[in-house]
Structure formats: structure tokens, C-alpha cells
Amino acid sequence: MKVLLRSDVDGVGKRGDIIDVAGGFARNHLLPAGKAIVASAGVATQAAAMRRSRDLKDARDRDGSETVAKTLVGNAVTITARAANEKLFGSVSAADIVRHVEEQTGAVIDRHDLVLDEPIKTTGEHNVRVELVGGVVFELTVHVVAAD
């Protein structure tokens, strides 16, 4: 069954795509949830309009991500935490890093944009990978210092 996606569906397609899916998947999931409409003869112009708006939104998101990256690349974020013998009492999480980034640089990022396998538990310099919308990826330097 041919359908026009009205929103992005993971593993299926993006908004504005005309795709061929199984009839049951369309009838039971996509159509009732409002994620797709049945593709008819006149739906091609609607699909083109959806793709144009999606492309414009993606370009705006990418530009915003590049602006944030230019602000943060080369700058280090300093976080003060209680520590003994270079080990922290507790840890520095992604939420802590995001809060300090906003306080120190004014750049706003989401904690889900940080690739942090486990919280930081030692003092010193740590590189944290940041993956922003639009495929913008860079390393953020985080200095964790012991509080006096």
C-alpha cells in the first residue's frame, strides 16, 4: 500500500516521503496514528511541499547547530566539584555539563546531545563528544577541578 508520511517514522521514512508499506502496517499503525495518509493521484504536490518544508527546517537546525559548535569549540568548561585524591564525591553527569555550558558560554545544548558513556568521576581534563542536530559533531573539553 502506498502512503504519504506526515511525520518521521523511525526505520520507515521521513515526512513527505511516499513509500510502499504492508497493508496491515498502514491500516493498523500509520493511518490511525495520523502518521500517514493514503497516497492518491493528487498527493504528489502535497508530498513535494512537505519535503520542501522538511529541508528548510533541517537547514535551519544545521545552521543553529553550527553556531553552537563555533561557540563551544576551543572553549573549555570548568566544573568545580568536591573531591579527594583526584576522585570525586559523586560524579559529573551530562545534566551538570549542560548547566555549566549554559552558565559559562550562553550556548544551549540538550543533555541527550552529549555522548557520555558513564559519568565523570575524577578531576582533570575530559573530552566529551557532542552530536548536535544536522550531523554537527565536535569535542567539548571539560575541566573538573576540586573544590577548596
Image (cartoon, rainbow, N blue to C red):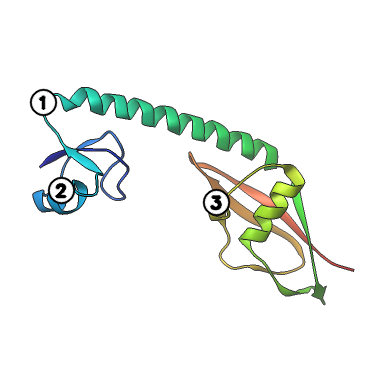
Residue 72 picture quarter: top right
The amino acid at mark 2 is Ala
Marked residue nearer the N-terminal end (1 or 2): 2
Dot 1: few (<14), some (14–19), or many (≥20) neighbours within 10 Å? Answer: few
Q: Which mark is residue 26?
A: 2
Query: Residue at image x 30%, y 47%?
Result: 9
| Mark 1 residue element | loop
Q: Which mark is residue 113?
A: 3
Query: Where is residue 61 shown, x and y percent of the image?
Result: 50, 35
Marked residue nearer the N-terminal end (3 or 2): 2
Q: Which residue is mark 1?
A: 41
Query: Where is residue 88 shown, x and y percent of the image?
Result: 75, 73
Are the residues flagged by discs 3 and 2 in contact, CB closer than 8 Å?
A: no
| Mark 3 residue element | helix
Mark in front: 3 vs 1: 1
Are the residues flagged by discs 3 and 1 in contact, CB closer than 8 Å?
A: no
